[in-house]
Amino acid sequence: MSYQPCTDPSITPASVNRKDSSKMNVLTSTVLLLNCFITVTCQSSTDNVYQIYLDPRGHFRFQWWVDYQRQDVHIKLTAMAVASSWFAVGFSDYGAVTSADLVVFWTDETGSHHFVDGHTDTGGFLFPDDHQDYNLTAVSSPPSHVVLQFHRAFDTCDVDDYVIDSGTTHVIFVESQTSSSPPFGTDITQVLHGVQRTQILKPDLPRPTFPPDTWTFEVVAPQIEVPAEETTYWWQTAMLPDIASPHHIIQYEGIIAAGSEDLVHHMEVFHCEVDDVDNLPYYSGPGQSEGMPEGLGVCRKVIGAWAMGAKAMVYPDEAGVPIGGPSYSRAALLEVHYNNPQRKPGRVDSSGIRFYVTSHIRKNDAAIMELGLEYTNKMAIPPGQSNFRLSGYCVQECTRVGTYPTGFHVFASQLHTHQTGKRVFTKHVRDGLELPELNRDNHYSPHFQEIRSLPRPVHVQPGDDLITTCEYDTSGRSKATVGGFSISDEMCVNYIHYYPKSELEVCKSSLQSHALDTFLYMLNRLEGADVSPAAGYRANYQNIDWSPANVNLLQMLYVTSYLSMQCNKSDGSRFPGDWEHSRVPDIQEPFVIQNSSNLCSDPAS
């Protein structure tokens, strides 16, 4: 990128970035700098240029590419803005326009352009930053729109700026149709605004090549009339194509029917491992909360999965999911989780998953493994909590018995919770030593659950522990939130994509039932809590008075009690072992991130 600076050597980009600049100097130097730019074309040093539209009208196109060597994000913003308006784009933790990091643009009555790094306070009022960290490289304003090109560091070391990481980034926009010069002091909660979610720091991976014989097929719902219920898990049996010779699935993607964008929460396609497809009953209807309808228990092997916000899942060149061949069952089951909170009747859906297949067999068979918490109401989050943790464990005894002696390599990960999840991560532990994390999303959104390729495959060895932790915010709820299938219940799952395929498909945990029963009995005897074995765990959790002391007791119970493990094969059976007395893994040596440069340290200290 290049720009033509002003002839006055005192007005340069550096004068905008000086820490001792006053707010007025920031505004003055920025407008002078803008008026001296010439229009240039954005040139990227990488082929990985991404874009999203921030608003449903398509008025704000946000394009970016990442310079990992310099730890910079380069942004090109095209805004369809009227001359009298001002607008801002930026970032916040979970998409709110309060406590947000914004860059603001407006044109004053003299025709001068202004570009200022700003932020909002907890009330949503807009202020300029003392330190300007968004570096403008080009601006043009042809009729009907404005094009801005600028860049910023991942971490600017400014407390008013958002730190961009490899998890979900909430990109926000603000637009006012009324002139305000400058717009600082405005309450932008009262101005048109919105949010779009993406992953800014995507791994810079080479794009896999598709063989010339690649073709596609789809598994979709056949015009389902969705029940007028908040949560429905719809199960639809289907027949896969007749593929005579072994093939590999090398990509799949969600197909969301027009008008169902708000309705489809997630989908999975299960392969039904049955000798005779005629023995598999046809089924099209709501599934049961606990287990499959009779006869469909053989449909357990996940071959494709999609969740709200996910893009296409592309397999690396060294792996693919096996499909086809003379003994391969053509039977499959599509599961669609519909979220219909307003219980609208008469909504029809035909969403599903599209698969890309090839006869060019790759080196490894790939598969999906579930980590985290079992889907059970033995786990719960008390009400009124802003940061409550639950962890699900894939213990060393399970990875030792369920995988090959050489272990397996994880190349992608999809984190999953329901409505109250706010942060999810999976730790990797070997013999008490914590290794780099498998995946982390510090700004997780249940509305954006894409499958994310890892920067490099992670080698998991037999005997390793994998700990998936979810943090929840139930501050807006008055009753305990229990684990379960409903959208108002909670989950904590990491679907990992790995190779080579092994028999282990589910490696998840829950609290041992005896430990929970003892906890409930204690509350009944000591506090007179309205709990009883006959009421069931859901009712018992919701009847407890969740004082701070009881919340702490529950948290302690979860991290000290025996685990009940699901160490399961794809047919639903468990591997041999004692899975009712597993211990929570002990991290003896936590992982420490080495940061020799310490970019944000004070050089005077």
Image (cartoon, helix red, strand yellow):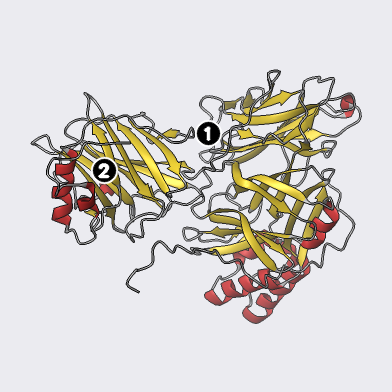
Q: Amino acid at mark 2?
A: Val
The quadrant holding residue 605 is: bottom left
Residue 560 versus residue 575 in the image, above or below: below
Q: Give the residue drawn at x 52%, y 51%.
A: 444
452 on left or right of 275: left
Res 508 visible: yes
Q: Give the residue drawn at x 25%, y 34%.
A: 139
Secondary structure type for disc 2: loop
107 on left or right of 362: left
Q: Nearer the viewer, mark 2 or mark 1?
A: 2
Residue 191: assigned label: 2
87 on left or right of 75: left
Specify which label sits upstream in the sequence, 2 or 1: 2
The quadrant holding residue 277 is: top right
Q: Give the residue drawn at x 65%, y 71%.
A: 589
Residue 577, image x, y percentages: 88, 60
Quadrant in which the N terminus appears: top left
How many other residues sit within 10 Å of disc 1, few (<14), some (14-19) or many (≥20)? few
Contact (Cβ within 8 Å) of mark 2 with mark 1: no
Q: Amino acid at mark 1?
A: Lys
Residue 107, image x, y percentages: 16, 37
Residue 64, image x, y percentages: 41, 38
Comparing 295 with 368, the one in front is: 368
- Report how far apart the C-alphas of labels 2 and 1 lie in the structure: 30 Å
Q: Which residue in the structure is indicated by mark 1? A: 344
How many other residues sit within 10 Å of disc 2, few (<14), some (14-19) or many (≥20)? some
Q: Give the residue drawn at x 63%, y 46%.
A: 456
Secondary structure type for disc 1: loop
